[in-house]
Image (cartoon, rainbow, N blue to C red):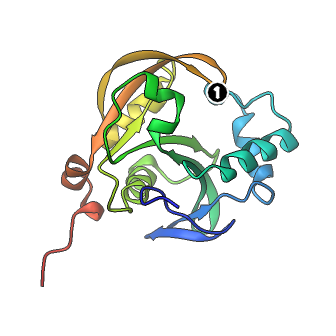
């Protein structure tokens, strides 16, 4: 159990905002849609393109077993649109690339082939990541070649902090670190702002 990650049973809804809902990934029930996403052209940055559906299921069953890494299926109007993995950076290879702070949460996003615009989906994903009060900062580290991912992060308010290189489970990774503090997120995304007292 962690105070930085939303938890629940497989398939359980753990966050809702507008028409977007976030559910604990079910490695069995969700393997088919996830496999379609990670094997399509342009998805090679995630390092999962060569996995069979069974291997992908086993991968996320392993993630499910970790108290420090959680995966979620995101739905819009009931339809799957993205997968989000949130994790403790101090328990991940990225920890060798920067000084982890208390309250940091790392994030990976896999976007589906059909989804609402990033202007709707991005703020919803941020609100979900910051839902636990213990989260103080979200950290992303897209591959430096994945310009679309970095552009999406910058559009959400993440501040690039420079290129880093570290050993990921898929081999050496050249990444662009970017950070978003809770305070900056609350200033930029109205849904994250605290409600006034009284």
Q: Quadrant of the C terminus?
A: bottom left
Crowd around label 1: few <14 · some 14–19 · many ≥20 (10 Å):
few
Q: Residue at image x 33%, y 38%?
A: 155
Give the image quarter of residue 150. top left
Q: Which residue is mark 1?
A: 42
In the displayed structure image, the side of residue 182 where residue 39 appears, left or right:
right
Mark yes or no: residue 19 visible.
Answer: no
Q: Please give left or right for residue 27 compared with residue 88 in the image.
A: right
**Residue drawn at the location 78% of the way across and 51% of the way down:** 31
Q: How many marks?
A: 1
Q: Residue at x 44, y 29 (%)?
A: 95
Corner quadrant of residue 154: top left
**Circle 1 — which element?**
loop
Residue 86 visible from this viewpoint: yes
Q: Position of residue 109 (x, y in %)?
A: 53, 42
Q: Is residue 26 above or below residue 182?
A: below
Which of the two residues, 166 or 129, is positioned nearer the viewer here? 166
Relative to 42, 86 lies left or right: left
Q: Is residue 54 above or below residue 124?
A: above
In front of the other: 151 or 91: 91
124, above or below 45, in the image = below
Question: Residue 136's x, y, as percent?
Answer: 29, 50
In the picture, residue 73 is in which quadrant? bottom right
Residue 2 screen position, x and y as percent: 48, 58
Residue at x 14%, y 75% (from the top left corner): 196
Horizontally, residue 32 falls left or right of residue 138, namely right
Considering only vertical position in the picture, is 123 above or below 145? below
**In front of the other: 114 or 81:** 81
């Amino acid at each position: 159990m962690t105070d930085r990650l939303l938890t629940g049973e497989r398939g359980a809804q753990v966050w809702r905002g507008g028409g977007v809902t976030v559910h604990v990934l079910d490695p069995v029930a969700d393997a088919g849609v996830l496999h379609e996403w990670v094997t399509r052209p342009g998805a090679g940055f995630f390092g999962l393109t060569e996995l069979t559906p069974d291997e992908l299921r086993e991968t996320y069953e392993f993630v499910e077993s970790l108290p420090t890494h959680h995966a979620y299926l995101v739905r819009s109007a009931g339809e799957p649109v993205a997968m989000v993995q949130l994790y403790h950076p101090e328990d991940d290879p990225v920890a060798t690339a920067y000084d982890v702070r208390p309250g940091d949460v790392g994030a990976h996003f896999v976007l589906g082939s059909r989804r609402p615009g990033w202007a709707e989906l991005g703020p919803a994903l941020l609100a979900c990541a910051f839902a636990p009060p213990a989260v103080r900062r979200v950290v992303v580290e897209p591959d430096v070649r994945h310009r679309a991912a970095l552009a999406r992060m910058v559009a959400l308010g993440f501040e690039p902090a420079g290129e880093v290189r570290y050993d990921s489970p898929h081999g050496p990774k050249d990444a662009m670190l970017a950070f978003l503090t809770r305070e900056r997120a609350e200033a930029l995304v109205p849904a994250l702002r605290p409600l006034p007292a009284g």
